[in-house]
Amino acid sequence: MDPSPPLNILVREPQGFSLWTGPPFSNGEPRVNLQVPCSSSKFSEDGSRLLAIKDNSSVVSIYESQNGREIASFQVPGLLAASLSPRGTYLQTFQKALPSQEKNLILWEIDNSTTVYQQFQKTMAKNNWPSIQFSSDEATACRMATNEIQFFDAKDFTKGVLYKLRIPGIASVELSKTPGSHVAAFVSESKGIPASVQIFVCGKDNPLQPVARRSFFRCSTVQLHWNFGSTGLLIVAQSDVDKSNQSYYGESKLNYLTTDGSHEGLVPLRKDGPVHDVQWSPSGAQFVVVYGFMPARITLFDKKCNPVFELGSGPYNTVRWNPKGTFLCLAGFGNLPGDMAFWVCSEKRLLGTTKSECSVTSEWSPDGRYFMTATTAPRLQIDNGIKIFHLDGSLYFKKMFEKLYQADWKPEAVERFGDIDELVKFVKTNLKIDDISKGPKPLSQSNTKVSTPAPKPTAYRPPHAKNAAAVQAELFGGGGGPSEEMSKNALRNKKRREKQREKKAAADNGN
Protein backbone atom coordinates (compact mmCIF):
# COMPACT_ATOMS: atom_id res chain seq x y z
CA MET A 1 0.00 0.00 0.00
CA ASP A 2 1.25 3.50 -0.89
CA PRO A 3 2.24 5.71 2.04
CA SER A 4 -0.48 8.05 3.30
CA PRO A 5 -0.32 11.57 1.81
CA PRO A 6 0.48 14.50 4.12
CA LEU A 7 -2.35 16.60 5.49
CA ASN A 8 -2.67 20.21 4.32
CA ILE A 9 -4.64 23.19 5.63
CA LEU A 10 -5.73 26.21 3.60
CA VAL A 11 -5.52 29.40 5.72
CA ARG A 12 -6.75 32.71 4.26
CA GLU A 13 -5.91 36.07 5.82
CA PRO A 14 -6.45 39.63 4.49
CA GLN A 15 -3.27 39.46 2.39
CA GLY A 16 -4.22 36.14 0.76
CA PHE A 17 -4.10 32.40 1.41
CA SER A 18 -1.28 30.11 2.51
CA LEU A 19 -1.06 26.32 2.45
CA TRP A 20 0.16 24.60 5.61
CA THR A 21 1.68 21.12 5.74
CA GLY A 22 0.57 18.95 8.65
CA PRO A 23 -0.44 17.98 11.27
CA PRO A 24 1.63 16.52 12.74
CA PHE A 25 3.74 19.69 12.89
CA SER A 26 7.49 19.64 13.33
CA ASN A 27 8.61 21.76 16.30
CA GLY A 28 4.96 22.54 17.02
CA GLU A 29 4.57 24.93 14.07
CA PRO A 30 3.20 24.30 10.55
CA ARG A 31 5.38 24.59 7.45
CA VAL A 32 4.03 27.04 4.84
CA ASN A 33 4.34 25.74 1.26
CA LEU A 34 2.38 28.24 -0.82
CA GLN A 35 1.34 31.87 -0.39
CA VAL A 36 -0.96 33.61 -2.90
CA PRO A 37 -2.63 37.04 -2.62
CA CYS A 38 -6.37 36.67 -3.20
CA SER A 39 -9.83 37.63 -1.95
CA SER A 40 -11.38 34.14 -2.08
CA SER A 41 -10.22 30.53 -2.42
CA LYS A 42 -11.72 27.06 -2.63
CA PHE A 43 -10.57 23.46 -3.22
CA SER A 44 -12.24 21.15 -5.70
CA GLU A 45 -14.16 18.29 -4.09
CA ASP A 46 -11.34 15.80 -4.68
CA GLY A 47 -8.66 18.29 -3.57
CA SER A 48 -6.71 18.08 -6.83
CA ARG A 49 -7.09 21.76 -7.72
CA LEU A 50 -7.47 25.08 -5.97
CA LEU A 51 -9.40 28.16 -7.09
CA ALA A 52 -8.28 31.68 -6.14
CA ILE A 53 -10.04 34.96 -7.02
CA LYS A 54 -7.68 37.95 -7.40
CA ASP A 55 -7.47 41.60 -8.49
CA ASN A 56 -10.74 42.97 -7.16
CA SER A 57 -12.71 39.87 -8.15
CA SER A 58 -11.95 40.01 -11.86
CA VAL A 59 -9.24 37.32 -12.24
CA VAL A 60 -9.74 33.63 -11.40
CA SER A 61 -6.58 31.51 -11.11
CA ILE A 62 -6.45 27.72 -10.85
CA TYR A 63 -3.57 25.93 -9.07
CA GLU A 64 -2.43 22.34 -8.79
CA SER A 65 -2.83 21.52 -5.10
CA GLN A 66 0.07 19.07 -5.00
CA ASN A 67 2.84 21.39 -6.21
CA GLY A 68 1.24 24.86 -6.09
CA ARG A 69 1.73 25.44 -9.83
CA GLU A 70 -0.66 27.87 -11.53
CA ILE A 71 -2.18 26.06 -14.51
CA ALA A 72 -4.80 28.54 -15.76
CA SER A 73 -6.03 32.10 -15.34
CA PHE A 74 -9.33 33.61 -16.50
CA GLN A 75 -10.37 37.26 -16.90
CA VAL A 76 -13.99 37.53 -15.74
CA PRO A 77 -15.22 41.16 -15.44
CA GLY A 78 -18.02 41.70 -12.93
CA LEU A 79 -17.55 38.28 -11.33
CA LEU A 80 -20.11 37.43 -8.64
CA ALA A 81 -19.45 33.71 -8.04
CA ALA A 82 -17.06 30.96 -9.15
CA SER A 83 -16.93 27.22 -8.51
CA LEU A 84 -14.88 24.17 -9.54
CA SER A 85 -16.39 20.87 -10.66
CA PRO A 86 -15.77 17.92 -8.28
CA ARG A 87 -12.67 16.68 -10.14
CA GLY A 88 -11.43 20.12 -11.15
CA THR A 89 -12.16 19.64 -14.87
CA TYR A 90 -14.44 22.67 -15.22
CA LEU A 91 -14.67 26.19 -13.83
CA GLN A 92 -18.13 27.74 -13.53
CA THR A 93 -18.53 31.53 -13.26
CA PHE A 94 -21.48 33.89 -12.86
CA GLN A 95 -21.16 37.57 -13.78
CA LYS A 96 -23.25 40.70 -13.66
CA ALA A 97 -25.44 40.92 -16.74
CA LEU A 98 -23.75 43.54 -18.96
CA PRO A 99 -25.42 45.25 -21.97
CA SER A 100 -22.62 44.02 -24.23
CA GLN A 101 -22.84 40.45 -22.91
CA GLU A 102 -25.86 38.29 -23.60
CA LYS A 103 -24.74 35.25 -21.57
CA ASN A 104 -23.39 35.64 -18.04
CA LEU A 105 -23.25 32.00 -16.83
CA ILE A 106 -20.12 30.44 -18.33
CA LEU A 107 -18.58 26.98 -18.00
CA TRP A 108 -14.85 26.82 -18.80
CA GLU A 109 -12.72 23.75 -19.49
CA ILE A 110 -9.62 24.41 -17.39
CA ASP A 111 -6.97 22.40 -19.25
CA ASN A 112 -7.37 24.30 -22.53
CA SER A 113 -8.93 27.52 -21.07
CA THR A 114 -11.90 27.44 -23.44
CA THR A 115 -15.61 28.10 -23.00
CA VAL A 116 -17.71 24.95 -23.40
CA TYR A 117 -21.13 26.29 -22.38
CA GLN A 118 -22.79 29.70 -21.96
CA GLN A 119 -26.25 30.67 -20.79
CA PHE A 120 -28.05 33.83 -19.67
CA GLN A 121 -29.23 33.64 -16.06
CA LYS A 122 -31.08 36.56 -14.53
CA THR A 123 -30.26 35.97 -10.86
CA MET A 124 -28.17 33.68 -8.68
CA ALA A 125 -29.22 32.48 -5.22
CA LYS A 126 -26.76 31.06 -2.71
CA ASN A 127 -28.84 27.91 -2.13
CA ASN A 128 -28.92 27.22 -5.90
CA TRP A 129 -25.21 27.74 -6.62
CA PRO A 130 -23.46 26.25 -8.50
CA SER A 131 -26.11 26.43 -11.21
CA ILE A 132 -24.72 23.40 -13.07
CA GLN A 133 -24.48 20.47 -10.66
CA PHE A 134 -22.15 17.49 -11.16
CA SER A 135 -22.04 14.03 -9.63
CA SER A 136 -18.80 13.27 -7.77
CA ASP A 137 -17.39 11.31 -10.73
CA GLU A 138 -18.50 14.05 -13.18
CA ALA A 139 -20.52 11.49 -15.14
CA THR A 140 -23.81 13.36 -14.73
CA ALA A 141 -24.52 17.09 -15.00
CA CYS A 142 -27.77 19.03 -14.75
CA ARG A 143 -29.08 22.58 -14.34
CA MET A 144 -32.34 23.97 -12.97
CA ALA A 145 -34.18 26.32 -15.34
CA THR A 146 -37.70 27.79 -15.28
CA ASN A 147 -40.14 24.90 -14.71
CA GLU A 148 -37.61 22.28 -15.83
CA ILE A 149 -34.31 20.46 -15.21
CA GLN A 150 -31.84 20.37 -18.09
CA PHE A 151 -29.37 17.50 -18.46
CA PHE A 152 -26.02 17.58 -20.29
CA ASP A 153 -23.33 15.24 -21.53
CA ALA A 154 -20.73 15.93 -18.82
CA LYS A 155 -17.91 14.88 -21.16
CA ASP A 156 -19.00 17.10 -24.05
CA PHE A 157 -21.01 20.23 -23.23
CA THR A 158 -20.87 21.38 -26.86
CA LYS A 159 -23.81 19.03 -27.49
CA GLY A 160 -25.96 21.41 -25.47
CA VAL A 161 -29.02 20.19 -23.56
CA LEU A 162 -29.54 16.46 -24.17
CA TYR A 163 -32.98 16.19 -22.58
CA LYS A 164 -35.27 18.05 -20.19
CA LEU A 165 -37.43 17.06 -17.24
CA ARG A 166 -40.43 19.38 -17.00
CA ILE A 167 -41.54 20.15 -13.42
CA PRO A 168 -43.85 23.21 -13.10
CA GLY A 169 -43.08 25.43 -10.12
CA ILE A 170 -39.65 23.91 -9.39
CA ALA A 171 -37.72 25.94 -6.80
CA SER A 172 -34.53 23.92 -6.10
CA VAL A 173 -32.70 20.78 -7.24
CA GLU A 174 -30.22 18.39 -5.63
CA LEU A 175 -28.37 15.83 -7.76
CA SER A 176 -27.18 12.70 -5.98
CA LYS A 177 -23.37 12.56 -5.87
CA THR A 178 -22.23 8.96 -5.52
CA PRO A 179 -23.45 7.85 -7.99
CA GLY A 180 -25.33 10.55 -9.92
CA SER A 181 -28.25 8.24 -10.63
CA HIS A 182 -31.12 10.31 -9.19
CA VAL A 183 -32.19 13.92 -8.86
CA ALA A 184 -34.49 15.43 -6.22
CA ALA A 185 -36.70 18.41 -7.09
CA PHE A 186 -38.50 20.73 -4.65
CA VAL A 187 -41.74 22.40 -5.74
CA SER A 188 -42.95 25.19 -3.47
CA GLU A 189 -46.54 25.80 -2.35
CA SER A 190 -48.83 27.53 -4.82
CA LYS A 191 -52.55 28.44 -4.71
CA GLY A 192 -53.45 25.95 -2.01
CA ILE A 193 -51.42 23.12 -3.52
CA PRO A 194 -48.92 21.76 -0.95
CA ALA A 195 -45.18 21.82 -1.51
CA SER A 196 -43.53 18.58 -2.55
CA VAL A 197 -40.20 16.83 -3.10
CA GLN A 198 -39.99 14.38 -6.00
CA ILE A 199 -37.20 11.95 -6.91
CA PHE A 200 -36.50 11.13 -10.57
CA VAL A 201 -34.11 8.67 -12.21
CA CYS A 202 -31.48 10.35 -14.36
CA GLY A 203 -31.25 9.18 -17.97
CA LYS A 204 -32.88 10.04 -21.27
CA ASP A 205 -34.50 6.60 -21.62
CA ASN A 206 -35.93 6.50 -18.09
CA PRO A 207 -39.61 7.25 -17.42
CA LEU A 208 -40.49 10.85 -16.58
CA GLN A 209 -42.62 9.88 -13.58
CA PRO A 210 -41.12 10.26 -10.08
CA VAL A 211 -40.03 7.09 -8.29
CA ALA A 212 -40.78 8.71 -4.90
CA ARG A 213 -42.73 11.74 -3.74
CA ARG A 214 -43.53 13.52 -0.48
CA SER A 215 -45.91 16.48 0.04
CA PHE A 216 -45.71 19.11 2.81
CA PHE A 217 -48.07 21.74 4.14
CA ARG A 218 -46.60 24.89 5.70
CA CYS A 219 -43.25 24.48 3.97
CA SER A 220 -41.28 27.41 2.56
CA THR A 221 -37.77 25.92 2.09
CA VAL A 222 -36.10 22.51 2.25
CA GLN A 223 -32.64 21.06 2.81
CA LEU A 224 -31.93 17.90 0.79
CA HIS A 225 -29.33 15.35 1.97
CA TRP A 226 -28.45 12.35 -0.25
CA ASN A 227 -26.63 9.38 1.23
CA PHE A 228 -23.62 7.58 -0.21
CA GLY A 229 -25.05 5.13 -2.74
CA SER A 230 -27.96 7.42 -3.68
CA THR A 231 -30.55 5.14 -2.08
CA GLY A 232 -31.98 7.50 0.56
CA LEU A 233 -32.87 11.20 0.80
CA LEU A 234 -33.34 13.14 4.05
CA ILE A 235 -35.53 16.25 3.74
CA VAL A 236 -35.59 19.03 6.34
CA ALA A 237 -38.83 20.92 5.59
CA GLN A 238 -38.71 24.42 7.09
CA SER A 239 -41.65 26.74 7.70
CA ASP A 240 -41.24 30.45 8.43
CA VAL A 241 -44.07 30.41 11.00
CA ASP A 242 -44.52 28.10 13.97
CA LYS A 243 -48.26 27.86 14.58
CA SER A 244 -47.68 26.50 18.08
CA ASN A 245 -45.81 29.76 18.93
CA GLN A 246 -43.00 27.79 20.55
CA SER A 247 -40.24 29.05 18.27
CA TYR A 248 -39.54 32.47 16.81
CA TYR A 249 -37.61 30.85 13.93
CA GLY A 250 -40.51 28.78 12.60
CA GLU A 251 -40.78 25.01 12.64
CA SER A 252 -38.97 22.19 10.87
CA LYS A 253 -39.78 18.55 10.15
CA LEU A 254 -37.46 15.73 9.06
CA ASN A 255 -38.72 13.43 6.30
CA TYR A 256 -37.14 10.40 4.69
CA LEU A 257 -37.58 9.04 1.15
CA THR A 258 -35.97 6.01 -0.48
CA THR A 259 -35.47 5.51 -4.19
CA ASP A 260 -36.92 2.00 -4.08
CA GLY A 261 -40.15 3.19 -2.46
CA SER A 262 -39.63 1.18 0.74
CA HIS A 263 -40.03 4.24 2.99
CA GLU A 264 -41.86 7.54 2.74
CA GLY A 265 -42.71 9.63 5.78
CA LEU A 266 -41.51 11.44 8.86
CA VAL A 267 -38.45 10.36 10.82
CA PRO A 268 -39.70 9.31 14.30
CA LEU A 269 -38.16 12.00 16.51
CA ARG A 270 -38.88 11.75 20.24
CA LYS A 271 -38.80 15.42 21.20
CA ASP A 272 -40.59 18.52 19.97
CA GLY A 273 -38.60 21.37 18.49
CA PRO A 274 -36.45 22.26 15.49
CA VAL A 275 -34.10 19.99 13.55
CA HIS A 276 -30.69 21.56 14.23
CA ASP A 277 -28.54 19.26 12.09
CA VAL A 278 -28.66 15.91 10.31
CA GLN A 279 -25.72 14.07 8.71
CA TRP A 280 -25.33 10.76 6.90
CA SER A 281 -22.47 8.47 7.85
CA PRO A 282 -19.76 8.12 5.15
CA SER A 283 -21.04 4.62 4.34
CA GLY A 284 -24.60 5.87 3.83
CA ALA A 285 -25.97 3.17 6.15
CA GLN A 286 -26.76 5.40 9.17
CA PHE A 287 -27.56 9.01 9.98
CA VAL A 288 -27.50 11.15 13.12
CA VAL A 289 -30.08 13.83 13.98
CA VAL A 290 -29.71 16.69 16.49
CA TYR A 291 -33.20 17.93 17.29
CA GLY A 292 -35.56 19.42 19.85
CA PHE A 293 -35.65 22.45 22.08
CA MET A 294 -32.52 22.92 24.18
CA PRO A 295 -31.06 20.79 25.56
CA ALA A 296 -31.22 19.10 22.16
CA ARG A 297 -31.54 15.34 21.79
CA ILE A 298 -29.28 13.23 19.55
CA THR A 299 -30.35 9.94 17.95
CA LEU A 300 -28.60 7.53 15.60
CA PHE A 301 -30.84 5.88 12.94
CA ASP A 302 -30.20 3.13 10.41
CA LYS A 303 -31.11 3.49 6.73
CA LYS A 304 -34.48 1.88 7.41
CA CYS A 305 -35.26 4.85 9.66
CA ASN A 306 -35.17 2.79 12.86
CA PRO A 307 -33.56 4.38 15.95
CA VAL A 308 -30.38 2.47 16.82
CA PHE A 309 -28.86 4.40 19.71
CA GLU A 310 -29.51 7.47 21.84
CA LEU A 311 -26.47 9.71 22.32
CA GLY A 312 -28.09 11.68 25.12
CA SER A 313 -28.95 15.35 25.21
CA GLY A 314 -27.05 18.59 25.64
CA PRO A 315 -26.36 22.07 24.26
CA TYR A 316 -25.62 20.84 20.73
CA ASN A 317 -26.64 21.95 17.23
CA THR A 318 -23.89 20.42 15.05
CA VAL A 319 -22.83 16.87 14.21
CA ARG A 320 -19.74 15.77 12.23
CA TRP A 321 -18.74 12.23 11.17
CA ASN A 322 -15.07 11.59 10.63
CA PRO A 323 -14.33 10.35 7.06
CA LYS A 324 -13.81 6.77 8.25
CA GLY A 325 -17.19 6.71 10.00
CA THR A 326 -15.57 5.47 13.20
CA PHE A 327 -15.80 8.65 15.30
CA LEU A 328 -18.42 11.32 15.76
CA CYS A 329 -18.27 14.86 17.11
CA LEU A 330 -21.29 16.62 18.62
CA ALA A 331 -20.90 20.37 19.09
CA GLY A 332 -22.83 23.47 20.08
CA PHE A 333 -21.66 26.44 18.01
CA GLY A 334 -23.23 29.73 16.97
CA ASN A 335 -25.15 31.16 19.93
CA LEU A 336 -24.24 28.13 22.08
CA PRO A 337 -21.18 28.00 24.38
CA GLY A 338 -19.07 25.66 22.20
CA ASP A 339 -19.36 22.30 24.01
CA MET A 340 -17.97 19.33 22.05
CA ALA A 341 -18.38 15.60 22.71
CA PHE A 342 -16.41 12.88 20.87
CA TRP A 343 -17.93 9.43 20.43
CA VAL A 344 -16.59 6.06 19.29
CA CYS A 345 -19.32 4.96 16.88
CA SER A 346 -18.45 1.25 16.80
CA GLU A 347 -18.51 1.07 20.61
CA LYS A 348 -21.32 3.64 21.03
CA ARG A 349 -19.34 5.16 23.89
CA LEU A 350 -18.40 8.68 24.83
CA LEU A 351 -14.66 9.26 24.42
CA GLY A 352 -14.17 12.77 25.76
CA THR A 353 -15.52 16.30 25.98
CA THR A 354 -14.04 19.76 25.55
CA LYS A 355 -14.97 23.29 24.50
CA SER A 356 -14.23 25.56 21.54
CA GLU A 357 -16.01 28.85 22.09
CA CYS A 358 -17.13 31.14 19.25
CA SER A 359 -16.30 28.62 16.50
CA VAL A 360 -17.64 29.45 13.03
CA THR A 361 -16.44 26.40 11.05
CA SER A 362 -15.52 22.85 12.08
CA GLU A 363 -14.42 19.71 10.24
CA TRP A 364 -12.50 16.43 10.59
CA SER A 365 -9.17 15.92 8.85
CA PRO A 366 -9.25 13.62 5.79
CA ASP A 367 -7.46 10.85 7.73
CA GLY A 368 -10.05 11.04 10.53
CA ARG A 369 -7.51 11.65 13.32
CA TYR A 370 -7.88 15.40 13.99
CA PHE A 371 -10.78 17.80 14.41
CA MET A 372 -10.31 21.48 13.52
CA THR A 373 -12.44 24.46 14.58
CA ALA A 374 -11.94 28.05 13.39
CA THR A 375 -13.20 31.46 14.47
CA THR A 376 -13.32 33.57 11.33
CA ALA A 377 -14.32 37.00 10.04
CA PRO A 378 -16.63 38.57 9.04
CA ARG A 379 -18.84 36.49 11.34
CA LEU A 380 -16.62 37.42 14.30
CA GLN A 381 -14.12 40.26 14.13
CA ILE A 382 -12.20 39.43 17.30
CA ASP A 383 -10.49 36.34 18.75
CA ASN A 384 -9.95 34.86 15.28
CA GLY A 385 -7.97 31.64 15.38
CA ILE A 386 -7.58 27.92 14.66
CA LYS A 387 -7.79 25.02 17.12
CA ILE A 388 -6.95 21.40 16.29
CA PHE A 389 -8.05 18.60 18.64
CA HIS A 390 -7.16 14.94 19.05
CA LEU A 391 -9.78 12.19 18.88
CA ASP A 392 -10.44 12.36 22.61
CA GLY A 393 -10.93 16.14 22.62
CA SER A 394 -7.49 17.08 23.93
CA LEU A 395 -6.04 20.22 22.32
CA TYR A 396 -3.16 19.55 19.89
CA PHE A 397 -2.60 22.96 18.28
CA LYS A 398 -3.81 26.55 18.65
CA LYS A 399 -2.94 29.70 16.71
CA MET A 400 -4.54 33.14 16.95
CA PHE A 401 -4.81 35.68 14.10
CA GLU A 402 -5.49 39.37 13.95
CA LYS A 403 -7.91 38.58 11.10
CA LEU A 404 -8.76 35.14 9.68
CA TYR A 405 -11.24 34.58 6.85
CA GLN A 406 -10.97 30.87 6.11
CA ALA A 407 -9.48 27.60 7.38
CA ASP A 408 -10.12 24.38 5.40
CA TRP A 409 -8.57 20.94 5.17
CA LYS A 410 -7.32 19.95 1.74
CA PRO A 411 -9.65 17.11 0.64
CA GLU A 412 -8.12 13.69 0.10
CA ALA A 413 -9.57 10.30 -0.80
CA VAL A 414 -10.28 8.34 2.37
CA GLU A 415 -8.86 5.18 0.80
CA ARG A 416 -5.40 6.75 0.66
CA PHE A 417 -5.12 6.67 4.46
CA GLY A 418 -4.60 3.62 6.61
CA ASP A 419 -7.16 2.30 9.05
CA ILE A 420 -7.27 3.64 12.58
CA ASP A 421 -8.28 0.38 14.19
CA GLU A 422 -5.33 0.67 16.55
CA LEU A 423 -6.86 3.86 17.95
CA VAL A 424 -10.17 2.11 18.54
CA LYS A 425 -8.33 -0.71 20.35
CA PHE A 426 -6.49 1.87 22.43
CA VAL A 427 -9.83 3.40 23.39
CA LYS A 428 -11.20 0.01 24.42
CA THR A 429 -8.27 -0.99 26.59
CA ASN A 430 -6.78 2.18 28.07
CA LEU A 431 -9.49 4.77 28.46
CA LYS A 432 -12.05 4.85 31.24
CA ILE A 433 -14.98 6.52 29.63
CA ASP A 434 -16.90 7.29 32.82
CA ASP A 435 -13.95 9.15 34.31
CA ILE A 436 -13.38 11.40 31.31
CA SER A 437 -16.78 12.85 30.64
CA LYS A 438 -17.74 16.08 32.29
CA GLY A 439 -20.49 16.70 29.80
CA PRO A 440 -23.91 15.12 29.36
CA LYS A 441 -24.16 11.36 29.89
CA PRO A 442 -25.71 9.11 27.25
CA LEU A 443 -29.32 8.23 27.89
CA SER A 444 -28.48 4.53 28.10
CA GLN A 445 -26.36 5.25 31.19
CA SER A 446 -28.65 7.77 32.85
CA ASN A 447 -30.45 5.16 34.92
CA THR A 448 -27.31 4.26 36.86
CA LYS A 449 -27.45 7.40 38.96
CA VAL A 450 -30.38 8.79 40.92
CA SER A 451 -30.99 12.34 39.82
CA THR A 452 -32.70 14.85 42.07
CA PRO A 453 -35.79 16.42 40.55
CA ALA A 454 -35.38 19.93 39.26
CA PRO A 455 -37.09 22.62 41.36
CA LYS A 456 -40.51 23.58 40.10
CA PRO A 457 -40.38 26.97 38.37
CA THR A 458 -42.27 29.74 40.14
CA ALA A 459 -44.29 32.51 38.59
CA TYR A 460 -42.50 35.73 37.74
CA ARG A 461 -43.10 38.61 40.15
CA PRO A 462 -42.08 42.12 39.12
CA PRO A 463 -39.92 44.12 41.55
CA HIS A 464 -42.71 46.47 42.59
CA ALA A 465 -44.88 43.52 43.66
CA LYS A 466 -42.36 41.90 45.99
CA ASN A 467 -43.51 43.95 49.05
CA ALA A 468 -47.15 43.99 48.00
CA ALA A 469 -48.23 41.80 50.95
CA ALA A 470 -46.71 44.12 53.52
CA VAL A 471 -48.21 47.19 51.84
CA GLN A 472 -51.63 45.54 51.69
CA ALA A 473 -51.46 44.62 55.36
CA GLU A 474 -50.40 48.15 56.22
CA LEU A 475 -53.30 49.70 54.33
CA PHE A 476 -56.10 47.22 54.86
CA GLY A 477 -54.98 45.14 57.80
CA GLY A 478 -54.98 41.84 55.92
CA GLY A 479 -52.65 39.05 57.12
CA GLY A 480 -49.94 37.96 54.70
CA GLY A 481 -49.51 34.42 56.05
CA PRO A 482 -48.42 32.43 59.08
CA SER A 483 -44.73 33.04 58.50
CA GLU A 484 -44.97 36.75 57.72
CA GLU A 485 -44.48 39.34 60.46
CA MET A 486 -46.77 42.38 60.59
CA SER A 487 -45.23 45.82 60.86
CA LYS A 488 -45.83 48.00 63.97
CA ASN A 489 -48.11 50.43 62.16
CA ALA A 490 -50.18 47.60 60.67
CA LEU A 491 -50.51 45.97 64.10
CA ARG A 492 -51.57 49.31 65.68
CA ASN A 493 -54.17 49.86 62.95
CA LYS A 494 -55.48 46.34 63.37
CA LYS A 495 -55.99 46.80 67.15
CA ARG A 496 -57.72 50.14 66.56
CA ARG A 497 -60.16 48.56 64.09
CA GLU A 498 -60.88 45.68 66.49
CA LYS A 499 -61.71 48.16 69.31
CA GLN A 500 -64.03 50.06 66.98
CA ARG A 501 -65.82 46.84 66.05
CA GLU A 502 -66.22 45.94 69.76
CA LYS A 503 -67.67 49.39 70.61
CA LYS A 504 -70.09 49.14 67.71
CA ALA A 505 -71.20 45.66 68.74
CA ALA A 506 -71.75 46.78 72.35
CA ALA A 507 -73.80 49.76 71.17
CA ASP A 508 -75.99 47.52 69.00
CA ASN A 509 -76.62 45.14 71.93
CA GLY A 510 -77.59 48.08 74.18
CA ASN A 511 -80.20 49.25 71.73
Image (cartoon, helix red, strand yellow):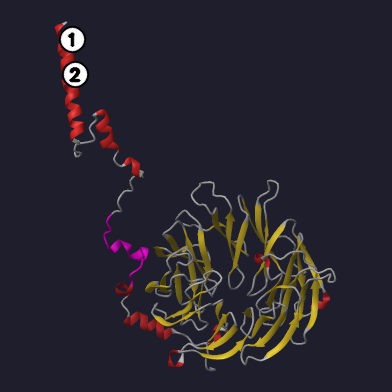
Q: Is residue 438 magenta?
A: yes
Q: Main secondary structure of the magenta part?
A: loop
Give 358 or 205, whichever is nearer the viewer.
358
In the image: residue 507, left or right of residue 360: left
Q: Confirm whether residue 414 shows in the render.
A: yes
**Mark 2 residue element:** helix
Left or right, 315 with reference to 240: left
Residue 353, image x, y percentages: 38, 73
Q: Is residue 5 visible?
A: no
The residue that disc 1 covers is 508
Q: Depth check: give the residue in front, 214 or 186.
A: 186
- Residue at 36 percent across and 80 percent down: it is 427
What amino acid type should be assigned to the residue bearing mark 2?
Arg
| x and y percentages locating residue 301 in the rendered image | 48, 65
The image quarter in which residue 93 lies? bottom right
Residue 345, label in figure? none
Q: Residue furthest top?
A: 511
Q: Amino acid at mark 1?
A: Asp
- Tell me if residue 434 is in the magenta stretch: no
Residue range (magenta)? 437-452
Q: Is residue 138 above or below residue 380?
A: below
Nearer-N-terminus badge (1/2):
2
Where is the C terminus found, in terms of image quarters? top left
Alpha-carbon neighbours of circle 1 within 10 Å: few (<14), some, or many (≥20)? few
Circle 2 packing at 10 Å, graded few (<14), some (14-19), many (20+), is few
- Residue 201 in which image quadrant: bottom right
Q: CA distance from mark 1 to mark 2?
A: 11 Å
Residue 245 location (% of width, % of height): 50, 47
Closer to the camera in the image, 111 or 123: 123
Say which residue label 2 marks.
Answer: 501
Q: Where does residue 1 sit, x and y in percent of width and height?
A: 53, 93
